[in-house]
């Protein structure tokens, strides 16, 4: 299980990789001296079912945010 600052950095590296950012650019962002560290430790593989699950969760969050915003407008 990931915890703390390194988990955040791994998440950044993995998401940048999924956005097709070049490994060398990810290495530079994370300030690693060795690209192997970036590739072997920080960039994690994510399968399609995991992406789909997070997309579904994101949609639920967006629905909740929209409902809360609408409710706030009604109260004002």
Image (cartoon, grey):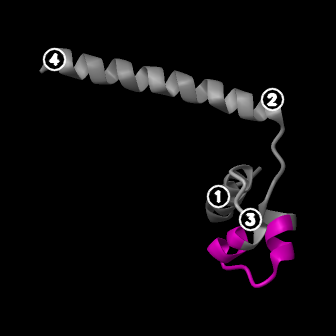
Q: Disc 1 or 2, which lies upstream in sequence?
A: 1
Q: Residue furthest left?
A: 76
The residue positioned 71% from the left and 27% from the top of the image is 53
Q: Please tell me in which quadrant of the rendered image residue 41 appears.
A: bottom right
Vertical relation: 12 (above or below) 69: below
Spatial distance from mark 1 to mark 2, Cα to Cα?
Answer: 19 Å
Residue 6 placement, left or right of 76:
right
- The span picked out in magenta is 25-39
**Discs 2/3, front:** 3
In this view, the residue in front, 12 or 2, is 12
Residue 49 image label: 2
Residue picked out by circle 1: 12
Mark-to-mark CA distance, 3 and 4: 47 Å
Tally of marks: 4
Upstream in sequence: badge 3 or badge 4: 3
Secondary structure under badge 2? helix
Residue 40, position as x, y percentages in the image: 87, 66
Of badges 4 and 2, nearer the viewer stands 2
Which mark sits nearer the N-terminus, 4 or 2? Answer: 2
Q: Check if residue 38 falls in the magenta segment.
A: yes
Q: Are marks 1 and 4 in contact (CB under 8 Å)?
A: no
Look at the image and say whether residue 46 sits in the magenta stretch: no
Q: Tell me the quarter of the image containing the C terminus.
A: top left
Q: Are marks 1 and 2 in contact (CB under 8 Å)?
A: no
Residue 22 numbered tag: 3
Q: CA distance from mark 1 to mark 4?
A: 38 Å
Quadrant in the picture for residue 38:
bottom right
Checking the image for residue 75, the label placed there is 4
Q: Position of residue 34 (x, y in %)?
A: 81, 81
Looking at the picture, tell me which residue is in the foreground, 8 or 14.
14
Residue 45 appears left or right of 54: right
Crowding at dot 2, Cα within 10 Å, few <14 / some 14-19 / many 20+, comes out as: few
């Amino acid at each position: 299980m990931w915890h703390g600052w390194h988990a955040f950095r791994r998440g950044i590296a993995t998401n940048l990789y999924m956005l097709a950012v070049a490994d060398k650019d990810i290495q530079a962002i994370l300030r690693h001296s060795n690209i192997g560290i970036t590739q072997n430790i920080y960039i994690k593989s994510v399968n399609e079912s995991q992406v789909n699950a997070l997309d579904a969760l994101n949609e639920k969050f967006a629905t909740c945010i929209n409902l809360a915003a609408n409710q706030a407008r009604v109260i004002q």
